[in-house]
Image (cartoon, rainbow, N blue to C red):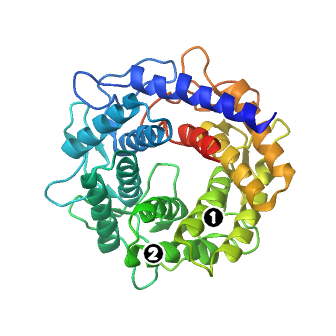
Amino acid sequence: MTFQQLKSEVREELLQNILPFWSEKMTDQKNGGFYGRIDGNNQLIQNADKGGILNARILWSFSAAYLQEKNPLYLELANRAKDFILAHFFDPEFGGTYWTISFDGKPVDTKKQIYSQAFFLYAFTEHYRASGNESSLQTAIGLFRLIEKRSFDAERNGYFEAYSRNWELLEDLRLSEKDANEKKTMNTHLHILEAYTNLYRVWKDPELARQLRNLILIFTEKIVNATTKHLDLFFDENWNSKAKIVSYGHDIEASWLIDEAARILADQELPTIVQKTCIQIAEAACEGLQPDGSIVYEKDSTTGHLDKDRHWWVQSEAVVGFLNAYELTDNTEWRNKAMKCWKYISENLIDRADGEWFWSISDEGIANRKEDKAGFWKCPYHNSRMCLEVLSR
């Protein structure tokens, strides 16, 4: 496969499948914004709660698509997402954004998960980049200041996970039931890093620069395991690692997001150290690489159990991570890995009958229909971003 062929196929996937699915099937004309869920059998659940992560990622995706393609429909949909979020997800009394709201826009879970605040920051920054809307930039800046005020641990460094509506640290800090209940996590730090990187593109604030640089060093010095080069996932407040799970998808995603952060920050001391580390992380992620070009989900290093499912988001991040490693090294093996992973996606994960992608494919090649086609965690972010990164690169 040539780069031109890859670009052509990916662009068609973005414009003819991913974005039409979300614009045509998920737009809630009755209650505003977008529906909360389509299940794995392609059934729309009209009264499903609407998640903050889903809505932030919809805002990011259509903003980013408009920035790339300049299709007025994408800006219209981004504006729709922005207006609904501002009207229903932001807490007018205590600040920040709710975790979930009802199908008709009423608060349901009012906790303040920092992971979610970061995604709204990321999305409003992208909306500003796409539209030039100054109020979106100010919303993003406000969220940056909120995260720094409420979540940053000035004594031991890093960011705490989750708070009540009125900003008391929660006992149950988890993003999801599968996570360890620890005060600091790789995942939240990765997406604060991602959000701060995007904001720094358009707002060269000295405090933001310091905190972005600090986040990069948190990864290189605390989160990347010095022995294995995998990311450690869960930590106590003193940065003691608390779990032995290897997440291949987060490894390969971090390998390019950390590199991107260092490049956007343009700190002369960082690129050499960071690029070496990013290649090491990408190489570690390849432990999960399969002969068909896909990457399996995760491994429990304590028990040795390997989850061989091929999740949609992991394959998306693998394509970008491999391309980034190719750009850093000029080693054609990385390019070939990216091409082969895209071939796997094209032949297995894309639902050519009903649109979008399946949640995952089993090791036996069976599509997972138990998990959502669209929902709280199944959003147009990983796969649309993969397409946009391929096009821009």
Which secondary structure, mark 1? helix
Q: Is residue 343 left or right of residue 89?
A: right
Judge whether residue 124 can be spotted in this image. yes
Question: Could you tell me residue 173's position as x and y percent?
Answer: 40, 60
Front-most of 341 and 169? Answer: 341
Q: Which residue is mark 2?
A: 209
Q: Quadrant of residue 370?
A: top right
Q: Is tag 1's residue or tag 2's residue first in the polypeptide sequence?
A: 2
Against 318, residue 380 (above or below) is above
Q: Residues within 10 Å of mark 2 (few under 14, many from 20)?
A: many
Against 266, residue 142 (above or below) is above
Query: Which disc number belongs to residue 290?
Result: none
Which image quadrant: the N terminus? top right
> For the point 40% across and 53% down, which residue is it?
119
> For the point 28% across and 49% down, which residue is it?
133
Front-most of 68 and 292? Answer: 68
Front-most of 62 and 4? Answer: 4
Question: Could you tell me residue 337's position as x and y percent?
Answer: 80, 44
Front-most of 80 and 317? Answer: 80
Q: Amino acid at mark 1?
A: Asp
Q: Single out the residue that lies furthest toward the left.
A: 93
Judge whether residue 242 can be spotted in this image. no
> For the point 38% across and 78% down, which residue is it?
207
The residues bearing labels 1 and 2 have C-alpha atoms spaced at a distance of 15 Å
Q: Which residue is mark 1?
A: 259
Which secondary structure, mark 2? helix
